[in-house]
Amino acid sequence: MVDPEARDRTRRSLHGLAELLLAGPQYAQSEDIRLRATAGGLGTVAAPDVRIDGVELVVGNARHRLDGTVGEIAERVGLVPRELSDVYSDTAGVDVDDVVSLDADAVAEIAGAFASGDAALRAFAPTEEPVLWPEHFDIGISVDEVNYGVSPGDAHVAEPYAYVGPWSPRSGSFWNMSFGAVRPMSELADAAAVEAFFRDGAHHDSADPPAS
């Protein structure tokens, strides 16, 4: 069981690292902010080759412990931090002087959620490429004006969750959030269950049918 406070601290640190040390440097070098899910966390899709693997930062073939401030880590591994407020407004709210705080169990929970989400999205829509976006720190795709994805948790739901977000409002019992429908990942046993939730969302086009 992951401690909720440790999860919150870990999620914030991971979001800041994803923005400042992965997507930011990648945008500076390759003009691309997209990230991807990896076996142990997340990584860039273009140069520079940077990954978060558990509680380590992998730059090329070198592994570095993620401790200290964001700025100290960047200097240690030879990266130039770059914030992305000129690209999007909803930034992580983390700066180079913030101390990275990672709980190993929380990292594993979040990495597992992203990995399951990635597998489920690929099975659900094989022609789409799942993207882990640094802005909202979630992995997702859009199909037929509906967003599908997995979040590590946020103000809406404290723990990692899968979501279906139609671009147009829907009504009915399936839609349990103002933006669509969510299911905690703790209620979805594996990637197949996450995919099934996505498929349920794709079939719920409108309100529930009237009772007979």
Image (cartoon, rainbow, N blue to C red):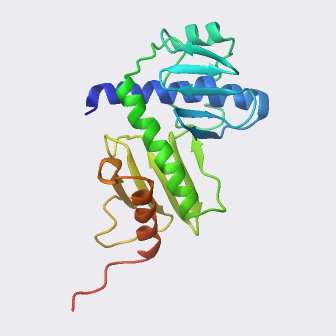
Image coordinates of residue 124 in percent, x first then y, are: 54, 63
Q: Quadrant of the N terminus?
A: top left
- Give the residue furthest to the right: 30
Which of the 4 image quarters holds residue 197?
Answer: bottom left
Whether residue 127 is visible:
yes
Whether residue 169 is visible:
no
Question: Residue 84 versus residue 11: which sits nearer the camera?
Answer: 11
In the displayed structure, 54 sits above or below 36; it is above
Which of the 4 image quarters holds residue 157?
Answer: top left
In the displayed structure, 90 sits above or below 199; it is above
- Give the residue furthest to the bottom: 212
- The number of numbered discs placed on residues in the rendered structure image is 0
Q: Residue at x 62, y 62 (%)?
A: 126
Q: Quadrant of the C terminus?
A: bottom left
In the displayed structure, 200 sits above or below 108; it is below
Image coordinates of residue 177 in percent, x first then y, are: 33, 58
Left or right position of 31 against 166: right
Q: Residue at x 64, y 8 (%)?
A: 75
Question: Residue 209 versus residue 51: which sits nearer the camera?
Answer: 51
Image coordinates of residue 30 in percent, x first then y, are: 78, 33
Question: Residue 53 versus residue 205: which sits nearer the camera?
Answer: 53
Image coordinates of residue 101 in percent, x first then y, are: 41, 18
Q: Residue at x 42, y 65 (%)?
A: 196
